[in-house]
Amino acid sequence: MTVDSAGGAYHLLRQLLNPATANNRQMAESDAYVDHPLLTPEFIERRLYQIQLAGTARNGHTLVCLPTGLGKTTVSLLVTAERLHEIGGKSLFLAPTKPLVEQQAEFYRDALTIPDDEIVVFTGEVRPDDRAALWDDATIIIATPQVVENDLVGNRISLADVTHLTFDECHRGTGDYAYVYIAGRYHADAQQPLVTAMSASPGGTKEDIQIICENLGLDTVEVMTEDDADVDEYTYETDIEWKRIDLPQEILDMRDGINEVIEDRLEKLRELGVTKATSPDISQKQLNKIGAELRKLMDNDQSEGYKGMSMHAEIMKLRRAVTLVETQSVESVRRYFERQKNAARSSGASKASQRLIAEPKVQEAMRAAEAYDDLHPKFSQTRILLAETLGINDGDRVIVFTESRDTAEALTDFLSQNFHVRRFVGQGDKEGSDGMTQTEQKETLDAFRAGEFEVLVSTSVAEEGLDVPEVDLVLFYEPVPTAIRSIQRKGRTGRQDKGRVVVLLANDTRDEAYFWISRRREKEMESELRKLKGVAEEVEEELEAPQSALDQFDGEAAESTKATNGGVEQATAEATQSTGGDQPGLTDYGTAEDDEEATEPVDSGDVSDDDTESTEDEGIVATAKSDDEDSVEIVADQRELDSTVARDLSTRDGIHTRLETLAVGDYVLSDRVAVERKSVSDFLDTLTGGDRSMFEQVGDLTRNYSRPIVIIEGTDLYGSRNVHPNAIRGAVASLAVDFNASVLRTEDESETADLLETLAKREQQTRERAVSVHGEKQAKTRAEQQEYVVSSIADIGPVTARALLDYFGTVEAVMTARKEDLRDVTGVGEVTADTIREIVGSDYS
């Protein structure tokens, strides 16, 4: 699509280009910058390709594909400026990481004449209540997608007046990533939506790119490569050199010893029938398949599955050690082994960890790593390349990328002996390694830009879109087996002058495999982008077809609905005649008791009257607030965002969702109804894994709400595990009888959402009940505390605990009972009686 072929593009081009420039290509000094009422004067350099892309993006929902470092953000900024100037509203810019958000906010504040306090940052570090207030006063919001997703589900913000939404690094817009949900909400809620999505590497195939476009609601694709004349003016040749390195025999011996252990474990898995491969070079894809086969055995409660999964975990740990030995450094594998030894010595250590450090071949590799005092050849080569770039060639800056934080820290220490070096890593702390705070990351990049040091050693956190300054050398400590990441890395050089990229490759190691994968995938990516550029109109036509079908469906749906409703009305009338009354709906069925009785709290278990207090009017944190009298409110716990239920509900008409950190339950539907949601696997874990937390959770639910509900979600409750049906029925019966909870079944998350909607409408519309979130978990009653003490003796659970207390009368009597007397209690067998006596009567050590 050209500027001349798009009315909107031409309109914006005319506004952004100084009239003198349009008539005379001999630009004055002031004409070298874009002129616009909302742009800082003489700040944005005028580049024709950026203006052309912005013109197209202003005219429709557009995917902008542009090589890294050539100003995708500037394109979005130009569209934002024009939209805010033309129609007002708000602009929302989404970026996948906190450093990117901070960087873009700084750029927007510098580039726009909008007051700084109207350009706000939304990350997880800003409190939800503060975000709601900031949103109302902001003109531009720059945020991580997860925060916006949470605020949308919780109805803290509205996208109605957002007139421009930008998805940075939009190749992430697949699957359950937050971009997909936000895009759906935006197209549904915004009064005048416009989407700009940006990436240097949107996908490997045309199909991948179409998926992104469909997920984000895009109908136009604009691709520019370095072959375009306008773009070529701002790019320079980037040399890519592959430095091959031979590893010394001592390092190869370490690797070979660990590989022998991997072969041994794979042979044992072969004997279990879950694999035929025994080579230590087995791929991760094959290992994933082995894991899936082992999980099937575990689901059938076959002991071979548990044994095999432990060996599978051991293989994964060993493969990591091999990768570190081959591609990183001896220091990194030494640190890794140290962490494994600490893990094996800790309480609750896995058998895989314990076997790993006890294996003679692994111990031999550990000793060899400790004894190795020579430089890893990659370390030596890195120092040589830095000396050549910064010394001989009089360069200014170098970035070294590595996959391993251990290697990043070891390299920083090593290179600091000769150069001014700083590390740049993510925010999360790892064992033996502190992460960097957001402030520390920003200060480090600012110092690098200012020339305060010359070498930045970074993990992958600096790869994606982060505005790292122009550098003379990008050094890959190892090949990157992903085309997207490799392209992102190479974009750090060659923007303003001829750049250099060097990749270190250890011969006869995993580096070789990653090298060929990287080469193949990059060629595929470049080829697909060229193809995409050539067939952009075809892609757009394919994207427009489903939209046209949807538009047509809207018209047909109205007629269809009218016809269907007519049929329903006729059927309803016939049913009414035959039954002599009105046909009830899902929310119309009455209860066996009137409303006054329904509001009374239900007693739990054996609790006596003097131990129970009504919670109907106590502990309320918030009540429902909605401007729409026909809508109902559903309060969801923050942790429920791991499922799609809350997100699904938030998109439904007539449903107002709110997020809280609930002390009790997963969903609150009224002042008396709260729901604990359990998947089938979670529910069965309470029967097979000794985890009784569900019964405690439902107990808390019962003490706070008079109508507690447990939803068991999923299929094959009685067949998915090797659990006797009577044990499952017993647990369900305990929930219903001992805890006064209604137990309901749903097939999947969608059906759970349907059920929650029906229950909420019944409570709030039919029964006219308000939503009240009851606050703190109440202290357990005396009887419940007694049950808790007894049930904790041997993980015997609440039902057997009650039976023991009913039989013996006191906790003391249970503790001092003889084994023979314990066996007289229903539910207590030989093993349980032995365990109780052993735990109660054994010396503490």
Image (tube, rainbow, N blue to C red):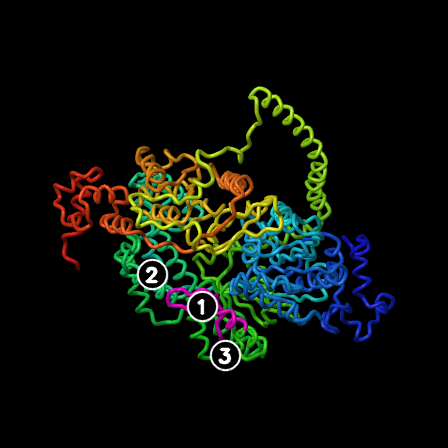
Residue 425 located within the stretch drawn in magenta? yes
How far apart are labels 3 and 1 at the CA level? 20 Å
- Residue 304 visible in the current orientation: yes
Is 441 on the left or on the right of 168, as rendered?
left
Q: Mark 3 or mark 1, which has the lower sequence index? A: 3
Q: Amino acid at mark 1?
A: Gly
Q: Nearer the viewer, residue 167 or 779?
A: 779
Q: Residue at x 73, y 52 (%)?
A: 60
The main secondary structure of the magenta stretch is: loop
Q: Residue at x 80, y 66 (%)?
A: 17
- Residue 345: percent from the left, percent from the top? 27, 60
Q: Which quarter of the image is occupied by the C terminus?
A: bottom left
Q: Nearer the viewer, mark 2 or mark 1?
A: 1
Where is 300 relative to 330, above or below? above
Q: Nearer the viewer, residue 444 or 151?
A: 151
Q: Mark 2 or mark 1, which has the lower sequence index? A: 2
| Residue bearing mark 1 | 435
- Residue 501: percent from the left, percent from the top? 57, 66
- Is the C-beta separation of discs 3 and 1 under 8 Å? no
Is 95 on the left or on the right of 218, as rendered?
left
The image's mark for residue 47 is none
Residue 277 located within the stretch drawn in magenta? no
Q: Nearer the viewer, residue 642 or 203?
A: 642
The secondary element bearing badge 2 is classed as helix
| Residue bearing mark 3 | 420
How far apart are labels 2 and 1 at the CA level? 30 Å
Where is 16 relative to 28, above or below? above
Quick one: label 1, few (<14), some, or many (20+) residues within 10 Å?
some
Q: Amino acid at mark 3?
A: His
